[in-house]
Image: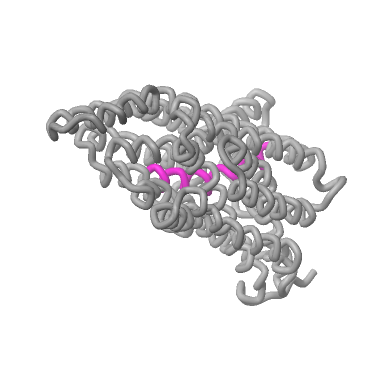
Amino acid sequence: MKPNTKQSYTTSLFLVGCLFFIFGFVTWLNGTLIPFLKAACELNNFQSYFVTFAFFISYFVMALPSSAILKATGFKKGMSLGLFVMAIGTVIFIPAALQRSYTFFLVGLFTQGLGLSILQTATNPYVTILGPEESAARRISIMGIANKVAGILSPLILATILLGDIDTVNAKLAGVADAAAKSQLLDDLARRIINPYIVLTIALVVLALLVLISPLPDIDDEEENPDIKANSQTTSIFQHPYLFFGVIAIFLYVGVEVIAGDSIISYGTYLGIPIDEAKFFTSFTLGCMIAGYFLGILLTPNIISQETALKVCAVLGILFTIGVLTSEGRFSVYCLAALGLAHSIMWPAIWPMSLKGLGKFTKTGAALLIMGIAGGAVLPLLYGRLADIQNNQVAYWILIPCYLYILYFAFWGHKAGYKK
């Protein structure tokens, strides 16, 4: 059911835009949290990347339950529920900071991820059904820009609060012999996070209430899934092997995107760049993603196909990674940030290439792809382990086979078993 007045349409579009802004804002805070919690909780590289594990593994856990929850609550109430669950996760950060408990921080991140997975499952269909079908691409573009702009702003805002003068704090910690004095310094550092997360909690609760009383329409299965009657000849989802190749591609894509975006601050400090400069590097990555996003809008599908765009992005991923591995200093960091350009078209290309022709299995296929987001949980941990064994730069070799697989999917994997 679409909004039936211009005012209702505008209000609905604004609220959904706010939700996409929240997706980006919360997701890209992790790049700042990793070096912050690494310092405050005295972690090694491997331990610090449990930040991304706790956050992204929730998508794997909630991918299938989200559909059942939304069936029971309806989409609008489901969105509000997702925001409230996220608010519970941000509240957990307060006792986590007071006790300087890394375990509590991870529980908070996992809870935020649970709420976000419900919210994303409910919100994505709205972009298509809120208005006329012929303007859906424009709405998708608006939402994508809102998401990425939030991703740029969130590390800028939080990094200024959490990572400001952290080099001075680290120098003090290195020179303190008394255990009680060191503990006090670390406690003071951890408590920097309390006020920002109180503000974030309030914002999530207010937005949840606004969604609940908003004119957002509920949608039915056919509106959410217009392909539901298509290709009904197949009797099993296993008759679509390209879908499963797509799940692997999503798994690897999310993994490399999270590594590139969430490790760049730590990588900069590893190279000797002061934290006051390095804390802004995640925003460089997001800026490159926005540039790639606009290129995608301009070029696909009128000039190049989504398959060609994915091939180009996979090749760029390989080339930029080689640049990271073989160069030094800031140029190596810039190559890492440029991976945002390579990643920009991957999700928009892999998603439709994996779901085409699924018909009545589209919902199940989408849930499997959402489960593939768990790549953001697993691959950064592997990167962190390699960084501890070797070093932060050499560990980026893990990206190369991931891009090679995505290149395989762009050429051949998306065709496996596909019947028009």
Give the colouring mode of the picture.
one colour
Locate residue 389: give its quadrant. bottom left
180 or 103: which is nearer to us? Answer: 180
User: Could you say which quadrant of the image residue 202 lies in?
Assistant: top left
Q: Quadrant of the N terminus?
A: top right
Q: Is residue 398 left or right of residue 69?
A: right
Q: Residue at x 72, y 54 (%)?
A: 315
Q: Residue at x 45, y 51 (%)?
A: 391
Q: Would residue 147 be counted in the magenta stretch?
A: no
Residue 137 position within the rendered picture, expressed as x and y whole percent measured from the top left: 74, 40
In the image shown, does 54 or 176 lie closer to the viewer? Answer: 176
Give the camera-side residue of 173 and 135.
173
Of 390 and 416, nearer the camera is 390
In the image, is residue 117 part of the stretch drawn in magenta? yes
Q: Position of residue 150 (x, y in %)?
A: 55, 30
In the displayed structure image, the side of residue 357 where residue 53 appears, left or right: left
Residue 263 in sight = yes
- In the rendered image, residue 151, in percent from the top left (x then y), is placed at 54, 33
What's drawn in magenta, residue-wise? 112-130
Determine the main secondary structure of the stretch shown in magenta. Answer: helix
**Vertical order, 334 against 44 (above or below):** above
Task: Tell me if I can see residue 57 in this picture.
Answer: no
At x 82%, y 52%, the residue is 305
